[in-house]
Image (tube, rainbow, N blue to C red):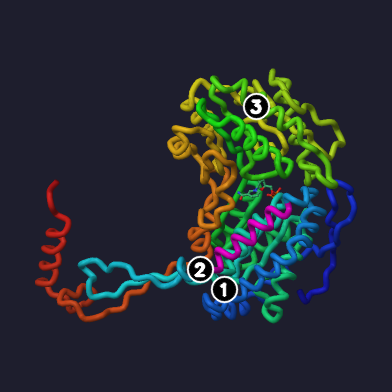
Amino acid sequence: MTTVQAKTFESLNPATDEVVGTYPIHSEDEVRAAVAAARPAAEWWAGLGFAGRLERLERWKGVLTRRAQQLAQVVHDETGKPHGDAMLEIILAIDHTAWAARNARKVLGPKRRSSGLLMANQASSVEYQPLGVVGVIGPWNYPVFTPMGSIAYALAAGNAVVFKPSEYTPGVGRWLADSFAEVIPDHPVFQVVTGFGATGAALCRSGVAKIAFTGSPATGRKIMAACADTLTPVLIEAGGKDALLVDADADLDAAAEAAIWGGMSNAGQTCTGVERVYVHERVYDAFVAKASEIAGSLKVGFEGDAQVGPITMPGQIDIIRRHIADALARGGRAVVGGPVAEGDKYVQPTVLVDVPEDAPAVREETFGPTITVTRVRDMDEAIAKANATDYGLGGTVFARARGMELARRLRAGMVAVNSVISFAGVPSLPFGGVGESGFGRIHGPEGLREFARAKAITRQRFRAPLTMTTFARTPKVDAQVAKLITLLHGKRR
Ligand code: NAD
C-alpha cells in the first residue's frame, strides 16, 4: 500500500485482552489502490498458465507447511482457540491448497464438447478463464481454513486476490499475504486490506470481478446490496444450525463423541458445528448419558491442554447467554453446564434437553459450546425437525442401515454419515449451503469453477451442406433442416 495510513486498530487476545498487533484501517481509496495494483498482477499471474502457477503455489504450500507452528501461534493468540485446533485448520488449508493447485488444469483446462448433429461441422470446446481480481472477505472463527477455501482456489484458477480478514484476526490475514510474498515478491498477486465492515464494503464497491464472502447471513445481505450497484457477482458462505441425527441402530459411543466434538470444539464457534441433536427414542437416554459424560470431562481454558477456549468475539457471549437462559426458562434442562454469568469469557460445555423447538437455542445460530438434544419417535420426525430451519449448511447422520437415505433427505449442502464435519476435509468435495447458509460452492472442482468464467469456442472444421447462419440460406435448406429436426425430435411417444 502506498497511501499514508491515517488510522489503525488493535487486535486483542480474547483470553488475556493483550494487544496482539496493530493494523491499518484501510480506507476506500486504499482499497481501490490495492485492487488497481492487483489488475496487472492478475494478468501476469494468469499468463503463467497452469504449470507456472502450480510450481509457485507448491512453493507457497511448502512455506505454509514448514512455518505452520508460527501461523498456529498467531491464530491461537487472536482467536484464543487451542494450539492443536489452530494446527488442524492450517493442515486442512494446506491440503486444500495442494489439491486446488494440482487439479486446476484438469478442471479448468480446455475440453471438447459434442457439437450435436445440426452443428456437426463445428469442433466445440469449453475452457475456464480467470475472472481477474477477486475480493475475499473472511470471518474470524477459522481465520485460515475458511478464507483459504476461496483464496487458494481463486489463485489456482489464475486470479489475483485482495483479502479483507475479520477485524478480530487481521494478523492471520497479514501473515498469509506476507508468506505468499516470500514466494512472489514482485507482483501483488495476493494482498491484504485490514479494517472493519467499512473496509469490506469498500472492497465490494472497488470493481473486483467477484466477492467471495464468509460470515453471517446479515452481513451477507449487506454484501449483496453493495455488490448490486456494480453487478459484481457474489458467493455467500454464511452461518448454520446443523443437526446430528442418531438412529436406533447407531454406534452410540461414536455418535456421542461426534456430537460433543462437533458441537464444542473451537468452543462451538464453527459454521458446520453441531447445534441440534435428534435421537431415536429407543436410544435417547443412553445417548444423553454418554454425551453428557464426554461434555462434562472437557477442559476449558486458554493455556496448555485446554480443549475449549474462550469465546473470541465478546458480543457472542450475550447471544449464547440469552439462548441458554431462554431454553431453561421454557422448561429445558442443562444436563451439563448451565447459565453463563455476566463478564465471563468462557462458556462451559452445555448439553440442553427438553428445549421446545421454537426456542432460539433450536432456531438461531448459537455459536457456542452448547447443543440441544431432542427425543424423536422415528427418523421421519428427525428429518422433519432437522429440516425445519432457514439454514442449510451441513448435517450429520449416525445410523447403520439408513445412513445414506437419511443423508439424502437432509436439506443441507454437505452431510457426514457416521463421522462429523469430514466433508470439509475432503478437498475434492464442494462446500456450501442452502437458504440462509448462502449459495455458491468453495472447494473441489465446483470451487475452482466459482473463480473462473466458462468460455465456449466453436471452430468450424468444414462448411456444412445445410448452413443456417447465412442470408444465402434457401427455402430448400429451411425445409431440409425442418425435416431433420422432425426426424430427430418429432417422434410420438
Ligand atoms: P460477520 O458477518 O460479522 O463478518 C464477516 C466479515 O465481513 C468480516 O471480515 C467483517 O469485517 C466483514 N463485514 C462486516 N460488515 C461488512 C459490510 N457491511 N460489508 C462488507 N464486509 C463486512 O461474521 P463473523 O462474525 O466474522 O463470522 C461468523 C459467521 O460466519 C457465523 O455466522 C458463521 O457461521 C459464519 N461462517 C460461515 C462459514 C461457511 O463456510 N459457511 C465458515 C465460517 C464462518
In this view, the residue in front, 299 or 448, is: 299
Label 3 residue SS: loop
| Quadrant in which the N terminus appears | bottom right
Q: Is residue 269 in the magenta section?
A: no
Rendered location of residue 290, percent (x, y) = 66, 27
Specify the quadrant of the image occupied by residue 178: bottom right
Tag 3: amino acid: Ala
Residue behind mark 1: 54
Q: Is residue 228 left or right of residue 111?
A: right
Q: Residue at x 67, y 32 (%)?
A: 371
Rendered location of residue 318, percent (x, y) = 78, 36
Residue 434 seen anywhere in this rendered image of the structure: no
- Magenta range is 86-102
485 lies above or below 242:
below
125 lies above or below 215:
below
Tell which circle, 2 or 3, labels the residue nearer the N-terminal end: 2
Q: Are marks 1 and 2 in contact (CB under 8 Å)?
A: yes
Q: Residues within 10 Å of mark 3 (few under 14, many from 20)?
A: some
Residue behind mark 2: 104
